[in-house]
Image: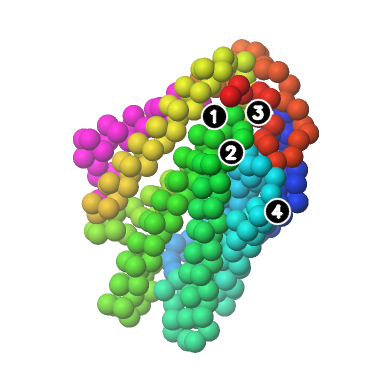
Amino acid sequence: MIRDVWSQVRPVTAQQRFLARCGTLLVVSGLFHAVVAAVDGGPWEGPVSWRKPVVFGLSFGVLVWSAVWVRRQLPASRWGWLPVGLLGGASVLEVALITTQRWRGVPSHFNTATGFDAFVFGGMAMCVLLVVVGVTALLVWSLIAARGAVGARIAAVVGLVGVLAAGRVGQDMISTGDAVTQATGHVPDGVVFGAAGGAKLVHAVGMHGLQVLIALVVLLALGDLAARTKRLVMWLAAAGYAVFFASVTSTAYAGRAWTDVTTPEAVTGVAGLAAVGAGVAVAAWPLVRGRRGDAVPTGGAGVDTLAAAVVR
């Protein structure tokens, strides 16, 4: 099973290997700084903490690794280096700038105390912009030229839309943090929308829905469910993710914590999570019963090998 899973996500072209190296570097950086945080101690929250190189390293790392899978759904093209280079390169530079500021012992975000700090903060904003351009290019490419199975296309498109939505939330977080910094003269410990809106939660849900949907596609490919069932499961999970994201977004932008939800928000949020959970349960059931699908081939370049396991 491990071999079959790896065959579906491993990089098989130069562009995919570039993304894989960038993603691996970022994940290793995040894990390394987690060890540093454990040894060094200090607060986990706050504008100057080891949390930032850890969380940003791991978050961008899994995003870039997810892009390896997305790139596998797309046809071979040298123009693919444009979104691949933007996403991989800008992600590494973004995390490098954040990490540099933590090692200097100063805030990475909203810090313009010196010319160098302002330069770093501006560079971070430019890196995020380049990441957004890269993700947008992959999304448009997936919409017009994806050659994978239906389930894979659903995961790629819905997941990438979520990443872009997270980018929009991040822009609002920057605007809010800037306003607080200018009003108080101090970098805020954290950013919330209104009184207690969970900006970080919304941003995280948008950033990482792509990985959940990819995992579901891989899980479906391993089982022996009918093609129609696999498509329905993917649509159910994608809709559930979208509904859950909408629910937490509504709560946060209303200035309320995720525990302080209205009845409609609670119902839609639970329903969304239940839909995703049901999709995972249905996909996993054949494997629990030992009913594996056909072996997934390990070769191929440019087109995800899921196409052999999930009927179009």
Disc with the residue nearer the chain's start (1 vs 4): 4
Using the rendered image of the protein, determine whether residue 238 is visible from the camera's viewpoint. yes
Disc with the residue nearer the chain's start (1 vs 3): 1
Q: Are marks 2 and 3 in contact (CB under 8 Å)?
A: no
Toward which corner of the image does residue 218 lie, by quadrant? top right
Q: Is 265 included in the stretch rendered in magenta?
A: yes
Q: Are marks 2 and 1 in contact (CB under 8 Å)?
A: no
Q: Which residues are magenta?
A: 256-281
Q: Distance from label 3 to label 4 (Cα)? A: 22 Å
Amino acid at the residue labelled 1? Gly
Toward which corner of the image does residue 275 lie, by quadrant? top left
Q: Which residue is mark 4?
A: 78
Q: Which residue is mark 2?
A: 146
Toward which corner of the image does residue 291 lie, by quadrant? top right
Circle nearer the viewer, 2 or 3: 2
Q: Which residue is mark 1?
A: 151
Disc with the residue nearer the chain's start (2 vs 4): 4
